[in-house]
Image: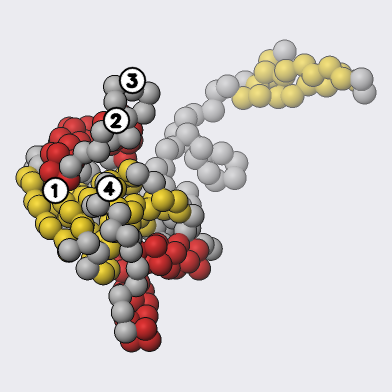
Amino acid sequence: QARNGKTALPVHSSEGDATIPVSFQQSSQSPNADGEDYNHIDHGVTQAPYERAFSPYDFNGGTTLAISGEDYAIVAADTRLSTGYEILSRNVTKLHELTPRCVLGSAGCKTDIDQLRSVLDINMKVYHHNHRKEMSTPSVAQMLGNTLYYKRFFPYYSFNVLAGVDSEGKGAVYSYDAIGSFERTPVTATGSGQSFLIPLLDNVIKQNNRHDEKRELPAEEVVEIVKDAFVTAGERDIYTGDMLEIMVIRKSGITKVTFPLKAD
């Protein structure tokens, strides 16, 4: 039933029938009775409320890796610093020496990583002044876990690996989550290229699900494997690249190796 350009739509209910008038002839350019033009898309520029958000964290990309051997530990990381699709720097180290036999590798938010390093360095100096000796690698691992756990309600956005040699001269590698849970493991990796490195390390280093005889790999051979692993990760991960830093840690000290990666 049409009246004055309006169509009455029938509505049936248990309380009786009714009709609802609906207009189909209103101009698309004219506003409604309340003065709002609902046919106009505002895109949040002038009329509609525009939501803004702030995050205290930023993921700056990068990949870290650590491998333990019989008498050595190897830790490696690339030097690219990114945000989104932008490269901020091509020469920012992700490795930090805590003692002459222990190195921290961190990927995540650069500012949080810098703050974490500062806190750890202060604790290391306090320990050295109190005890007149360097902290052992297992003790550093526990201290790092405690430091991360203290900030569990507002965590450091930092994903860490710790590599070094223990008091017996054996390689020790520790893997962490963001709030301090950690374990000692033969191999580990964190960062944007983690998913590309872990399967390779499980097969080549840990030799999982392989039937050939497992052998101890010398440090020089593991260094070459690490180079190949980062070249592989760099092909698929845009946040990994530019330069690879490798540190070989032994009881006698730390040896540094660099290797160029792709720069695009």
Q: Secondary structure at mark 1?
A: strand
Q: Nearer the viewer, residue 1 or 228?
A: 228
Image location (x, y in percent) of residue 43? 39, 43
Give the mark, 4 or 1, whose residue is nearer the N terminus.
4
Q: Residue at x 92, y 23 (%)?
A: 15
Q: CA distance from mark 1 to mark 3?
A: 32 Å
- Kindly identify which residue carries mark 3: 211
Give the mark, 4 or 3, whose residue is nearer the N terminus.
4
- Kindly identify which residue carries mark 4: 70
Q: CA distance from mark 4 to mark 2?
A: 13 Å
Q: CA distance from mark 2 to mark 3?
A: 8 Å
Image location (x, y in percent) of residue 257? 9, 52
Q: Which mark is residue 244?
A: 1
Q: Residue at x 27, y 46 (%)?
A: 69
How dense is the environment of label 1, judged by Cα within 10 Å: few (below 14), some, or many (20 and up)? many
Q: CA distance from mark 4 to mark 1?
A: 23 Å
Image location (x, y in percent) of residue 254? 16, 61
Give the mark, 2 or 1, whose residue is nearer the N terminus.
2
